Image (cartoon, rainbow, N blue to C red):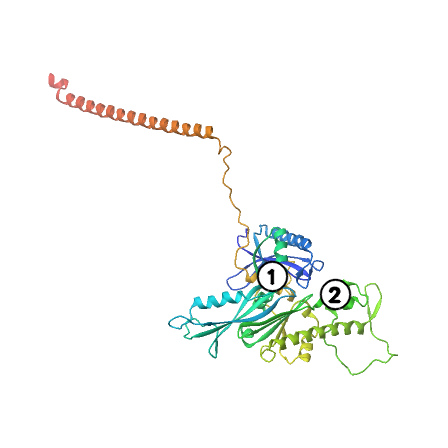
Amino acid sequence: MTITNFIAAIELGSSKIRGMAGTRNSDGSINVLAYADEDSTDFIRKGIVYNLDKTSQALNNIINVLEGKLNESIAKVYIGVSGQSLRSVHNSISKEVLQEDKIIDQKLMDLLSDENLEIPLIDLDILEVAPQEYKIGNNLQIDPKGVATDHIEGRFLNIVANKELKKRIEYCFEEAQIEIAELLVSPLTSANVILSEKEKRAGCALIDFGANTTTVSIYRDNLLRFLTIIPLGGENITKDLMALQIEENEAEHIKLTIGNACLEKNGQENSDEEEKAKYTLEDGRKIDLEDILLAIEARMEEIVANVWHQIQVSGYDDKLLAGIILTGGASKIKNLRKLIQEKTTIVQVRRADNTLKIHTSNKEFVEEASKNTIIGLLYAGQENCRQIPVMKEPVDLFENDEDLKRQEEEAKKTAIEKEKKKQEEEARKAKERKKEKAKEKKNNWFSSLTETFFSDDDIQ
């Protein structure tokens, strides 16, 4: 079956570049038509592109795989932007209402928004503006249009990042000859498919435990209130295990299979004589299991401590009625929920579940926490990303040959005159045939009449 309409998205992650193409159904669910990923640890660190050539090549590979599975060409893609420098910055703009009727109109609101974008930021780009309330007197309102007042204060939450972040991404896509449909802020698109309206309204913190970074997004009253990225993630745990002379792939496997963020404390210390439990590596070497588990726990405690500090900095630590929601690949580590409950004042902690229903027959795609970002990007896309074939008009090889054009015009004129003469001749012959037919009919009538009056019998 030919696919005529689909959305394509690419996530530039620190562990993998992921690409996906799919469609959105009327019921809000998603059909995953094609999925591809490539390891990006050699050229993307903490969400920032370091090796531009390798990134461009990986992007080409992803697009080629997707197009092969779709059997269609991709015209453009939606891109997710994240990275260590991404964060929220508050800004407020105040204005006197100069209209005669003192009523706030859309023109004044647009003026506030435009002035917000002019905020002086050194080496930073405003990637997104998260809407906040407007202050009118002592009241806060989401939509002040039509309200009578003589003064208004617009409050804005700007999502900013280092200029190099966007610049490098655009360079890589230009080199790969891939058009960008839109640059989207990844944490915002993830939240749209993970958090419910009820959670956003009550107040919650979405914590995305990535490979190199951990993202903290805080919502309250259905609005984003705070966003920051901590430069620590699951890869830090892997490196800690590698320091114990464990090979990287095996360290990653150990982290996800036996890793424990909050070990049970039995209150008893092992004596020197008591033999410690060992973990046997793939090459046969044995390492104290306790050393492995303590390394994982210590790093998770550090990450959670930083997360809790940022939540407190936001000022919403006592306003998160819906608690903390966990997502990302490193969130799969055992007892992370328990650790957060012990190290913070938040009791309600849960693992993220997509609020969307996913349909797919693609064997390469497995729905899991690490895919929430790419799913969010796909869901946020609005435009058809399919390359529509353009039918080329036939090329006139003799367009500039004046003699040939003159001959062509004369030939057309001769053909028209010939056709005209032919039509005139046919009309003349038709007229003559009509006359002959009428004359013949008249003669037949006269002969018939003569025979009637002057038959041989009458003469006798």
For the residue pair 435 and 392, the one nearer the viewer reads as: 392
Furthest-bottom residue in this view = 267
Residue in view at x 68 percent, y 64 percent: 46
Q: Secondary structure at mark 1?
A: strand
- The mark closer to the camera, 1 or 2, is 1
Is 110 above or below relative to 443? below
Residue in view at x 49 percent, y 35 percent: 396
Pointer 1: residues within 10 angstroms few (<14), some, or many (20+)? many
Q: Position of residue 426 (x, y in %)?
A: 32, 26
Q: Which residue is mark 2?
A: 252
For the residue pair 263 and 155, the one nearer the viewer reads as: 155
Q: Which residue is mark 1?
A: 80
Q: Position of residue 41 (x, y in %)?
A: 71, 60
Q: Where on the picture, by quarter, is residue 291? A: bottom right
Type of amino acid under label 1: Gly
Q: Position of residue 354 (x, y in %)?
A: 59, 68
Type of amino acid under label 2: Glu
Q: Is residue 421 left or right of residue 123?
A: left
Earlier in the chain: of badge 1 and badge 2, it is 1
Pointer 2: residues within 10 angstroms few (<14), some, or many (20+)? some
